[in-house]
Image (cartoon, rainbow, N blue to C red):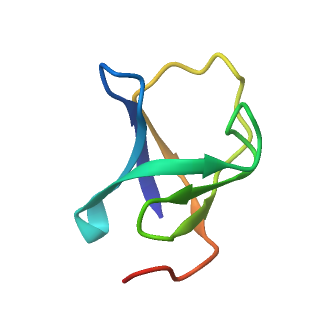
Amino acid sequence: MKVMIRKDAKGVLSAYVPKKDLEEPIVSMERPGMWGGSVTLANGWELALPEMADGTTLPITVEARRTSQGDD
C-alpha cells in the first residue's frame, strides 16, 4: 500500500495512508534509521518499509506492507 512518511515541525514522524484516510504517529521503529525494517503506528498497525538511504528526505511516499492488524 502507498504510505506517506513525514516529520512535523516538532520532529514527530507520522505515516499517512491515503486509501484509508488514516494518519497516525510512528511510535516505534525496528531499526534506528527506519528504512528496511518495520514501524509501529499509534493505532497498533505494523508496516514493513522498503530499504532506502538513511539520509532520505521527508516527506516521501513509499510502498509499504502491513504486517499486523492493530485497530482497524
Q: Picture coordinates of residue 29 (x, y %)?
A: 66, 47
Q: Picture coordinates of residue 55 (x, y %)?
A: 65, 16
Q: Picture coordinates of residue 46 (x, y %)?
A: 59, 66
Q: In the rendered view, would you say 13 is above or below 4?
A: above
Q: Residue furthest left?
A: 21
Res. 34 image quadrant: top right
Residue at 48% x, 64% y: name it.
1
Res. 5 image quadrant: top left
Of the pair 22 and 9, the residue shown nearer to us: 9
Q: Quadrant of the C terminus?
A: bottom left
Of the pair 72 and 4, the residue shown nearer to us: 72
Res. 31 image quadrant: top right
Of the pair 18 and 72, the residue shown nearer to us: 72
Residue at 75% x, 45% y: name it.
36
Q: Answer with left or right where residue 22 lies relative to residue 70.
A: left
Q: Answer with left or right where residue 35 lies relative to residue 13.
A: right
Residue at 28% x, 70% y: name it.
20
Q: Picture coordinates of residue 28 (x, y %)?
A: 61, 50
Q: In the rendered view, would you say 47 is above or below 37?
A: below
Residue at 49% x, 79% y: name it.
70
